[in-house]
Image: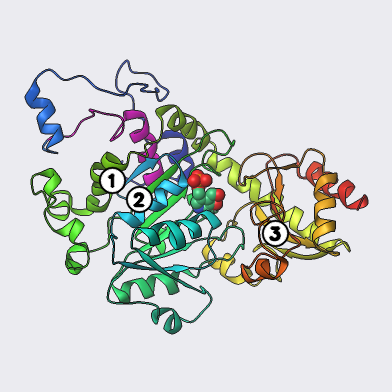
Amino acid sequence: MNKKQNLETICVQAGWQPKKGEPRVLPIYQSTTFKYETSEQMADLFDLKASGYFYTRLQNPTNDAVAAKIAALEGGVGAMLTSSGQAATFYAIFNICSAGDHVVSASAIYGGTFNLFAVTLKKLGIEFTFVDQEASAEEIRKAFRPNTKALFAESISNPAMNLLDIEKFSSIAKSEGVPLIVDNTFPTPINFRPLEWGADIVIHSTTKYMDGHAISLGGAIVDGGKFDWDKYADKYPGLTQPDDSYHGLTYTKTFGKTAFLTKAVVQLMRDLGSAQSPQNAFLLNVGLETLHLRVPRHCENAQRVAEYLESRPEIAWVNYPGLKGNKYYELAQKQMPNGTCGVMTFGLKGGRDVSVKFMDNLNFISIVTHVADARTCVLHPASHTHRQLSDEQLVAAGVAPDLIRLSVGIENVNDIIADIEQALAKI
Ligand code: PLP
């Protein structure tokens, strides 16, 4: 009875469990507010003495059902939804950091996250040191300071496609006494569950594979429930000391394993309000129901496309962890034996101009600022997301001027290859 269900079943069944006569399908609770019978009932909710819904900025039944599904997929003790992946990253950091604090982060991360860390959070007084995730544990440890509060990395980095050596990172986090926060957007819990490898907090841009159809922006934070905040009570006063805004309640004492998550909901979501709309949560849930079918298909197609690209004389290089010659091949086999994701990068001989021409020649493979949805798409960072940088600056940022990011969808792989083939023929 209590046996943990398999991922496929969790994708379809977890979260919404209707009682007698209730809708079989998760309803959209399109209501900002919820009704109570006495003033005292409402007061108890505000004091966190009772649990229940009162205002959708804090919690909503549709969102909670979807968050519970994501928590079950990742193997966490609980999860919350946010309005975007950016909001999830911000909340995960800001929940344990304030002005004067410091975080160590891998440098190969999504550009939006890098900007959030290096520019916006810096303005709030939170400083980041970016480390090369390939460096030795000894080297990475040198970046830690007495005021370091977290270690951050992406399980597969966007767009560099670096795989995180999570055992190295989790052992560093443990020995330094900080939580390891992992952005697991690209592999999704279908291919990788960071909490099982020693991560403490997992975040997602659900906008990507989880939604899977490019229809709803969203994010999620999953609490692993294992980090011992009280052991480092002085470092995490926000969790281990009384919160004046809740009559002196202490999160670790009152909420135990879900202290981190509860604080993020009742304090950060209350004050900052980046809630996901119930409509988007509903759409996300529909996406999650087929995540276990889509992700393997993305990976299968990507493997075929990567092998095809590698075989073509026009292609200078291909970076996909499923290719035998890739520097992450062995690590991918160990950490993600069922596959990584559908995203890869490659370059064409002839550089930037040829890359642009190739992309303009594509038919159904479209040029979009997105990755990780059902439709195959491409982006040329040097012309789009990083267009303000010179070729030298691009190289310094780890983005080659000829780099094309290809997100392989779930169409028939022969059609994807045929589209690439006809575009190559015209360059
Ligand atoms: N994390 C990763 C790995 C991403 O690729 C992205 C967006 O591309 C984000 C976070 C930010 O997510 P969102 O666009 O949903 O705010």
Crowding near the residue tagged with mark 3, few <14, some 14–19, many ≥20 C-alpha atoms within 10 Å = many
Q: What element carries label 2?
A: helix
Extreme residue in the bottom direction: 138
Is any atom of residue 415 visible in this view? yes
Q: What element carries label 3?
A: strand
Q: Are marks 1 and 2 in contact (CB under 8 Å)?
A: yes
Residue 352, how many percent across, how many down?
A: 79, 60
Image quarter of residue 338: bottom right
The residue beneath circle 3 is 345
177 in relation to 217, above or below? below
Identify which amino acid the numbered label 3 is placed on. Thr
61 in relation to 121, above or below? above
Question: Quick one: label 2 or label 3, which is nearer the N terminus?
Answer: 2
Q: Give the range drawn in magenta.
A: 50-71
The residue beneath circle 2 is 91
Left or right, 316 with respect to 127, comes to right
Q: Name the residue: 53% across, 61% down.
A: 109
Task: Check if residue 379 falls in the magenta segment.
Answer: no
- Camera-near label (2 vs 3) is 2
Question: Quick one: label 1 or label 3, which is nearer the N terminus?
Answer: 1
Report how far apart the C-alphas of labels 1 and 2 lie in the structure. 7 Å
Left or right, 108 with respect to 13, comes to right
The residue beneath circle 1 is 268
Task: Check if residue 58 falls in the magenta segment.
Answer: yes
Identify which amino acid the numbered label 1 is placed on. Leu
Q: Name the residue: 44% across, 60% down.
A: 117
Q: Which of the two residues, 329 or 375, is positioned nearer the viewer here?
A: 375
Residue 146, how many percent across, how many down?
A: 27, 76
